[in-house]
Image (spheres, rainbow, N blue to C red):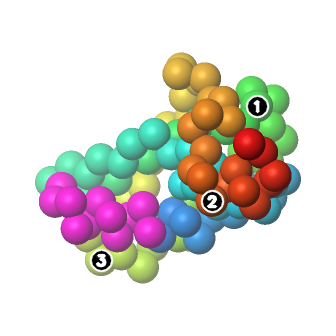
């Protein structure tokens, strides 16, 4: 996958807002990687802010919906991982400012 397509996918994922925090999953640092095979199967490796997050299915659905309009993406596989664990250090400067974290 070329860098322009990867940037396009990450841009689309910025439309997925964490319902609890009100910040997108990319700026929260929840998306660890995106990869696509030759058939358009797009794997999004991400985590959540907590293991017991009751909104995980909602976020997965939103990830799928965000990528549906990208022609190269034929199928989406969201892989939720817990290692490395998420911490506020993974958040962008924008997310930290928006949430009042220094």
Residue 30, visible in the rendered structure = no
Q: Nearer the viewer, mark 2 or mark 1?
A: 2
Rendering coords of residue 94 (x, y %) = 63, 59
Which comes sooner in the sequence, label 2 or label 3? 3
Q: CA distance from mark 2 to mark 1?
A: 21 Å
Q: Nearer the viewer, mark 2 or mark 3?
A: 2
Determine the secondary structure under disc 3.
loop
* Residue 82 appears left or right of 7: right
Determine the secondary structure under disc 1.
loop
Q: Which residues are magenta?
A: 1-11
Residue 77, visible in the rendered structure = yes
* Residue 69 appears left or right of 61: left
Q: Mark on residue 94?
A: 2
Q: CA distance from mark 3 to mark 1?
A: 32 Å
Residue wearing tag 3:
71
In the depicted structure, whether residue 33 falls above or below residue 27: above
Residue wearing tag 1:
50
* Residue 14 appears left or right of 77: right
Residue 9 magenta-drawn? yes
Which comes sooner in the sequence, label 2 or label 1? 1
Question: How many neighbours does mark 3 have within 10 angstroms: few (below 14), some (14-19), or many (20 or more)?
Answer: few
Q: What residue is drawn where x is 51% and y is 63%?
A: 13
Q: CA distance from mark 2 to mark 3?
A: 29 Å
């Amino acid at each position: 996958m070329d860098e322009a397509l990867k940037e396009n996918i990450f841009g689309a994922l910025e439309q997925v807002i964490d319902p609890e925090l009100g910040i997108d999953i990319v700026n929260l640092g929840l998306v660890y990687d995106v990869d696509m095979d030759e058939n358009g199967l797009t794997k999004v490796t991400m985590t959540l802010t907590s293991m017991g997050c009751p909104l995980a299915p909602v976020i997965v659905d939103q990830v799928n919906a965000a990528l549906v309009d990208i022609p190269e993406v034929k199928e989406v596989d969201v892989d939720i991982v817990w290692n490395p664990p998420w911490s506020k250090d993974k958040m962008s400067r924008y997310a930290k400012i928006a949430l009042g974290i220094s």
